[in-house]
C-alpha cells in the first residue's frame, strides 16, 4: 500500500492565479517565470480582482498577505474539485480556522467568514477563464518532472519514518504533498 502521493491541486492553483492577477508578487522570484508572466497578463473581471485584493491585509510586516492568502489556500482544500464548486463541509472549515492558534483572533471575524464563503463561486468563475486553463496546463507540464523528484523524496522519507520508528505501514497516515510553485 502506498500511503503517500504527490499531486497538484487545481483549486490551490486557481487561488494563486487570482492572487497573482490581483498583484500578489511574493512568488515572482520563486516560481516558473513563464507561468508567472502568463498569470500576470490574465484578463479577469474587476470584481474578481477586487476579491483577491482583499487578501492583502498589511497586518504582518514580513508577509502582507498573511493570513488571508494562507486561508484561501486552506479553504480551497475544502472545496470540490469539479463544477459546481461548493464547500464539502463549510462548518468543518470554519472550525479548523477558528482553532488555528497562529492566526490573530481579531482576524477571525464575520468579514473573513463572508469573504471565505464566496470562494467557491470565485473559483467557478476562474475555472471558466481560458487563460487560466492554459496556464494550468503549462503548470502541469512543468510539474511532471518535479513530481518525480518529490515522489522519490517522499518515498524515502516515508520509509525512514516507517523503519526507524518501527511503525506498520497501515498505522501511518496518508500523506499528500501538493506542490505549489506560485
Image (cartoon, rainbow, N blue to C red):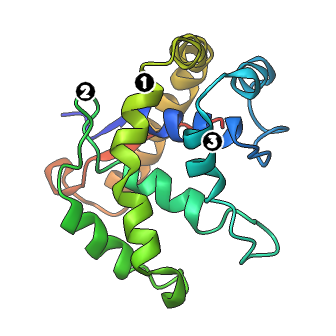
The reply to whether discs 1 and 2 touch (Cβ–Cβ < 8 Å) is yes
Q: In this rendering, is residue 21 above or below 103?
A: above
> Regarding mark 3 in the picture, which secondary structure is present there?
helix
Q: Nearer the viewer, mark 3 or mark 1?
A: 3
> Which numbered disc flags the more N-terminal residue, 2 or 3?
3
- Earlier-in-chain disc, 3 versus 1: 3
* The residue positioned farthest toward the left in the image shown: 170
Which residue is painted at 23% across and 43% down in the image? 86
**Res. 127 mark:** 1
- The image quadrant that residue 80 belongs to is top left
Instruction: Answer whether labels 2 and 3 touch (C-beta < 8 Å).
Output: no
Q: How far apart are the alpha carbons under marks 1 and 2?
A: 9 Å
**Residue sitting at x 66%, y 53%:** 53
Q: Which residue is mark 2?
A: 83
> Which quadrant of the view contains residue 55?
bottom right
Say whether residue 59 is visible.
yes
Q: In this view of the protein, which residue sits in the foreground, 98 or 123?
A: 123
- Of mark 1 and mark 2, the one earlier in the sequence is 2
Q: Which residue is the site of mark 3?
A: 49
Amino acid at each position: 500500500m502506498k500511503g503517500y502521493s504527490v499531486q497538484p491541486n487545481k483549486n490551490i492553483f486557481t487561488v494563486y492565479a487570482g492572487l497573482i492577477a490581483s498583484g500578489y508578487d511574493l512568488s515572482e522570484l520563486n516560481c516558473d517565470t513563464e507561468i508567472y508572466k502568463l498569470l500576470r497578463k490574465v484578463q479577469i473581471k474587476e470584481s474578481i480582482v477586487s476579491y483577491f485584493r482583499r487578501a492583502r491585509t498589511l497586518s504582518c510586516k514580513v508577509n502582507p498577505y498573511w493570513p488571508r492568502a494562507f486561508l484561501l489556500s486552506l479553504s480551497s482544500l475544502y472545496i470540490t474539485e469539479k463544477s459546481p464548486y461548493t464547500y464539502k463541509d463549510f462548518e468543518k472549515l470554519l472550525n479548523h480556522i477558528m482553532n488555528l492558534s497562529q492566526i490573530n483572533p481579531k482576524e477571525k471575524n464575520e468579514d473573513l467568514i463572508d469573504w471565505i464563503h464566496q470562494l467557491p463561486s470565485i473559483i467557478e468563475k476562474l475555472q471558466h477563464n481560458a487563460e487560466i486553463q492554459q496556464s494550468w496546463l503549462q503548470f502541469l507540464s512543468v510539474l511532471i518532472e518535479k513530481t518525480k523528484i518529490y515522489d522519490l523524496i517522499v518515498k524515502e522519507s516515508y520509509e525512514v519514518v516507517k523503519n526507524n520508528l518501527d511503525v506498520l505501514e497501515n498505522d501511518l497516515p496518508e500523506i499528500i504533498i501538493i506542490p505549489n510553485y506560485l
